[in-house]
Amino acid sequence: MKLLSNGFEYKITTEKATLYYSEQEHSLAKKVTKEKYSNIIKDILINDGESLNFESENKHFYYAFAPLDGLEKNLKVNVTKNKTIKREFAKWKLYEVLKAHFIIDFTKYGSDLSLYRKNAKNQWTGWDSYSSYNVIIRDWEIHLSIGSRNTLISQQPLENFAYKEQPVYKAFVNGHIIHRENLQNGNYLCLASQEVRIHERLISKPQFPNYSMYFDEIKKVYEEIISFEYESLLLMKDGFTRLQEHKDYFSVTRSYNVMLFKNGQTNINASNGIKK
């Protein structure tokens, strides 16, 4: 039996990088607490005498490994000394290239970033249909999954995050999906919320999953992503990771209810077995 994960390996090819940051709210940069991240960044600084320079009493600050407008301060850091920082660096190196090919969503509902692409077919008047793909970055592997096959974005700007008195929560702004909490009231192209979909009956008939088609679609996105060149980031081009029996998965007879987990642990409940 051949089993594949929907992940592929990556490598960071540098130790040194520039971290850009600001205390001012930012719609794209990662929001973190000063209490937690001050020590993390202190431990990865390269130049003696450098430190985070805060001028306000705000509990949070915003940082990125890309020179975004509004991030006016920067530091030189070692991105390989901390796993969290390493994953964040990989995300921004992906972003710098993929933003020219996909709409980017950093709103972090189950992924590190999501990639949107307009569908050729659409059945809804006044809305454009998009597919989205979730990217999760782990210590040594990047995972891809399908987020949605029918995210709807309004063809005309909506005023103050509402459509026919129904609220919307995300807007499409300059190639990015941004949550309304990071924007001022105004007129934006917006994503149809669940409230809008129900009120306007913008709900298509559910389709049962076809895993062969799912894999082919994910593989196509993977092949596109690895076709690009990234700064200081190497993506492995030998396909999705092949899972190993007795390491990544275990076999049981069809009539057997007890499942075998790592270290010889057995349990009839999958979630309990994974925890051990």
Image: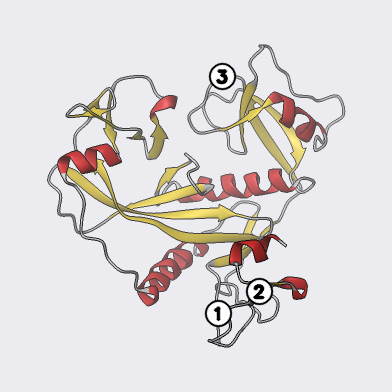
Residue on which the image places disc 3: 24
Q: Which of 19/41 is in front?
A: 41
The residue positioned 73% from the left and 30% from the top of the image is 36
Amino acid type, mark 2: Asp
Amino acid type, mark 1: Leu
The residue positioned 47% from the left and 39% from the top of the image is 107
Q: Secondary structure at mark 3?
A: loop
Marks 2/3: CA distance?
44 Å
Q: Nearer the viewer, mark 1 or mark 3?
A: 1
Q: Residues within 10 Å of mark 3 (few under 14, many from 20)?
A: some
Q: Quadrant of residue 187?
A: top left
Marks 1 and 2: CB-CB under 8 Å?
yes
Name the N-terminal-most of marks 1 and 2: 1
Q: Residues within 10 Å of mark 2 (few under 14, many from 20)?
A: few
Name the N-terminal-most of marks 2 and 3: 3
Q: Is residue 154 something one can see in this rendering? A: no
Q: Secondary structure at mark 1?
A: loop
Residue on which the image places disc 2: 248
Residue on which the image places disc 1: 3
Q: Is residue 173 above or below residue 263?
A: above
Q: Residues within 10 Å of mark 1 (few under 14, many from 20)?
A: few
Residue 74 in the figure: left or right of residue 229? right
Q: Is residue 155 above or below residue 130?
A: above
Q: Secondary structure at mark 2?
A: loop
